[in-house]
Amino acid sequence: MINKNVYYALLFIFLGYFLGSIMFGYLILKTFKKVDIIKESKDNNPGTANAYLYGGMVCGTSTLILDLLKGFIPVYFAKFFINIDNYWFILIMIAPVIGHAYPIYQKLRKGGKCIAVSFGVLLGLCPYLRCAIALAFWYIFFSTLIVIKPHALRSVLTYLCFFITIIFIVRIVTILISCLIISLTVILKHIKSLKKMEEPKVCFAFRRR
């Protein structure tokens, strides 16, 4: 007889993947702005950054919130049924990210780059927020103090530093493995942009003039 934990795990894995597969940036802009963000954007990315760029503040903020929630909801509620140190929790954490990167509704193509949804997943671990804080720190660090351009390179460096950091601050194996897979997924989704990347630029916020 299958353990009850397995049923719960499968439920939240499928919920996370199918929620992750919903491209809110694409749907919102297509509905309210009549813009196909996948075709119009330079990187064919239906994520939050392009939602702001092509849809403005309201569309961008709506996409951001919904992309955070689709990572947050399955992980947060799964904690009430399955311990986070259970190995099933790895699949629960990565499901929304994989869904966003390779959406079933788009035949596993035309997915996003997973930054907002990965934040949502880490916030879903609340009150265990070390991982979310670590990711936020490096994202802010490379966006304000040492500004790395273009965005694709900044994202790769952010997730590399994030994972190196949590090796030292996280002692829960399932979360550590999940963060590794999430980091690799985000980096892989940015590799295509890196191949046609403009010349990298580094700006120091407190540089002497």
Image (spheres, rainbow, N blue to C red):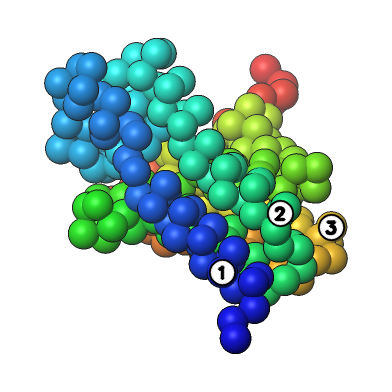
Q: Position of residue 42 (x, y in %)?
A: 23, 37
Q: CA distance from mark 1 to mark 2?
A: 14 Å
Q: CA distance from mark 1 to mark 3?
A: 31 Å
In the depicted structure, whether residue 112 falls above or below residue 49: below
- The nearer-to-camera label among 1 and 2 is 1
Q: Amino acid at mark 3?
A: Ile
- Residue farthest to the bottom, as pictured: 1
Which sits earlier in the primary sequence, circle 1 or circle 2?
1
Quadrant in the rendering for residue 104: bottom left
- Residue farthest to the front, as pictured: 1
- Answer whether labels 1 and 2 touch (C-beta < 8 Å): no
**Residue 7 marker:** 1
Q: Position of residue 195 (x, y in %)?
A: 32, 56
**Residue wearing tag 2:** 79
Left or right position of 156 against 76: left
Residue drawn at 25 percent across, 24 percent down: 29
- The quarter in which the N terminus is drawn is bottom right
Left or right position of 130 against 132: right
* SS category of the residue bearing label 1: helix
- Front-lying residue, 77 or 202: 77
